[in-house]
Amino acid sequence: MSESLPPELTPDLLRGLTSPRLNRRRFLQLGGLSALGVGLSACSIAGSKGSGGGLGGQAWRDEIAKFWANQKKQGHLDFANWPLYIDVKGNSHPSLDLFTKETGISVTYKEDISDNATYYGTKIAPALKAGQPIGPDIIVITNGFELTNLFLRDWLIPLDQNRMSNFYQYASDLAKDPAYDRGNVYTMPWQSGITGIGYNPKLIGHEIKGWNDLLDPKLSGKVGMFANNLDLPCAALCAIGVNPETSTPDDWNKAADWAKKQRTYVRKYYDQSYAGALARGDLWATMAWSGDIFLKQAENPDLKFVVPEEGGLIWTDNMCIPIHASHPLDAMTYMDWVYQPKIAAMLADYINYITPVSAAQQVFQKEAADATNDKDRAYYTNLANSPLIFPEPADFARLHRYPVIPADQVDAWNGLFEPIYQA
Amino acid sequence: MTAARTNRRRLGSRLAPYALILPGWLWLVIFFVVPAVSMLSVSTMTGNDLDGFKQTFHFGTYSQAWHDFHTQIVRSLLYGLIATAICVLIAYPVAYWIAFRGGKYKSSLLFLLLLPFFVSFVIRTQSWEFMLEDDGMVLRALRDLHLVGFMQDIGLVSDSGQILQTQVAVVGGLVYNFLPFAVLPIYVALERVEPALLEAAADLYASKPAAIRKVVLPLSLPGVFAAVLLTFVPASSDYVNSTILGGTNTTMIGNIIQTQYFTNLDYPTAASLSFILMGILLVGIFLYARALGTEDALAMAAAR
């Protein structure tokens, strides 16, 4: 069957396609044939585990191929994304307009997602548990508990690997074959970002180098940390010198101790609102997402972002297609379309997070070379050299991914870290 | 023939009130009884989201939930109580003033009171963030007036010189957000007090304060009772104010329920926490109604 697979498929990708986790899939769900029972009945709540037929990798691949062979282009697509996460010009999104022009597929774009857990809990889970479509054909979910939940429940349509030619040609190493989704079976990255430290050296009086600098009594009441169950624990793991991806429950205990010790100096455990607090001086140093600091530098040029010396975190927001989606083929077309370097550059120009297409750098360089005036040239040179969009190799060496916590240890993990930020 | 028709008519008139109340009952059943019962049933289930939850009548969830989160429950009730007390203390004079001194501006004044409701709850709370920030208008004004030390002494400003991310900010936010719910019912009660009663009290040699204490206050108690209910219940279960204005030690039970539900997918714990809170609030309100003798006040108001 390998003839039907794209030539780019490496042994690693093939391994991904046949890994044991995929053997237990419930195939009928692909076509939306199985309802998962009523959500909230009086006597029990049905589980949502995709446990099914136990068929082998090959049968599963045939099933996917059959699913995609039956799909037709419908000329429309619903896309749910996070706020401020696509190019904007006036009231429109130029990249989406271009997509419609080139492919004839119209796009309804909604900024519906502002938090993974809430979106999962209010929009995805209730609908899919009841066997109903959730509406959008593409959703953007960060690698983490919610994405893992979507995998475990078979709530995503495996991508059509034959329709990913741009992806396999242009996706950077970071985007291809990530540990949380071997072989890009379900996801294609939208953008990635870094969790590090944002700070204001003018107010602190010195530079911040790493997580342990946030243990300083002089910063008491001026340090912000994140109120979520991945960034905070992983930062603490980095702080004690452990790679979160390979951490053990023993490490988790030590990291929780570090976070408890550091808690004395913390002003607040923030959600999204930390960036404003940093810009206006309520915070002097805080856990931060790279792109936010870039945006806030316009407001307060003193702000700096650092990848901590003990290690920072790199996360990826992923495009994926939920089951029961109405326009899977149109979604597939779009997801691959954005991997053309010129489109990736269009998006990166506005978003300022790490683009999954490193060739976008050459697009910016070419724009700079072709520029007719100094202002444009400086602008594009700046973009091409931005460490936030194209991180330095040295920075990459210090970046870790979130661990995938086994389902039976999630309670222990949450029980350790949630009481620290929700006391 | 005639007798049968009369009977039928009598039956019809006997059933009419029940038919009329039917929509009300249906509404209650669909939007209160059904969700409450299913939540009660969820609270005693065991399992996890992946494998499903089964009804095992496991009441241990309740004691575990209380054990893990009683700090936040007690804190929420305390914040709710303080906020309600402040609300009523502010609302009573405001309502009194509008009812007795508002004159032809009554409706405009009430409209002004409700005006903030045209802006979303979250946005209104967020605007307090800007006012209370470390270099914001409130603290700057206090610094200019050299009042920061005094405010720190009475505990309104933290030792590190902050208002934002302290209990004061959270309780203040609750007071701000729920104040109109306290003013309106008190206003309605005061509005129904006949000014002639005050004149009669004056004729009987009651001083102005005595007239208010012995005539106006008892007559307005139903309004105060409603005001307390309308502020205490939502204030205790609010989570927005503590999310936006709170700090490391101001988590309320609403935040915990949200995390249990959305992040941990632990529906039984979330449901049992909701029921613990509901139970405490119901018992508290019942005791309060008994202690205040508000049943009499309500009956009195109804009789008039």
Image: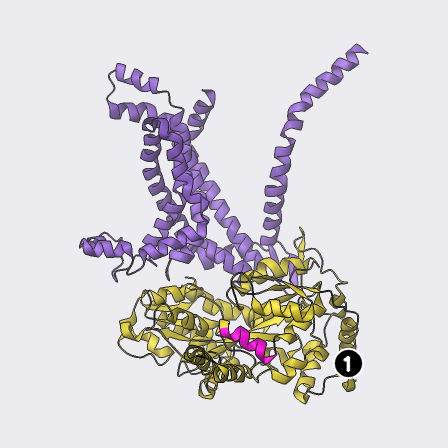
User: Is residue A363 highlighted in magenta?
Assistant: no
> Who is closer to the viewer here, B116 or A268?
B116
Where is residue A291? Give x, y as percent: 45, 73
Magenta highlight range: A339-349
Magenta part, dominant SS: helix
> Who is closer to the viewer here, A334 or B276?
A334
Image hue for chain B: purple
Badge 1 sits on which subunit? Answer: A
Q: Residue at the spot x=56%, y=84% of the render?
A: A359
Q: Residue at the spot x=40%, y=65% of the render?
A: A274
Quarter holding residue B12 = top right
Image hue for chain A: yellow
Residue B301 visible? The answer is yes
User: Is residue A343 highlighted in magenta?
Assistant: yes
Q: Is residue A275 left or right of B37 when viewed as pictured? A: left
- Disc 1 residue type? Gln
Image quadrant in which the N terminus of chain B is located? top right
Q: Which residue position is annotated with label 1? A: A58
Q: Residue furthest top?
A: B2
Q: Secondary structure at mark 1?
A: helix
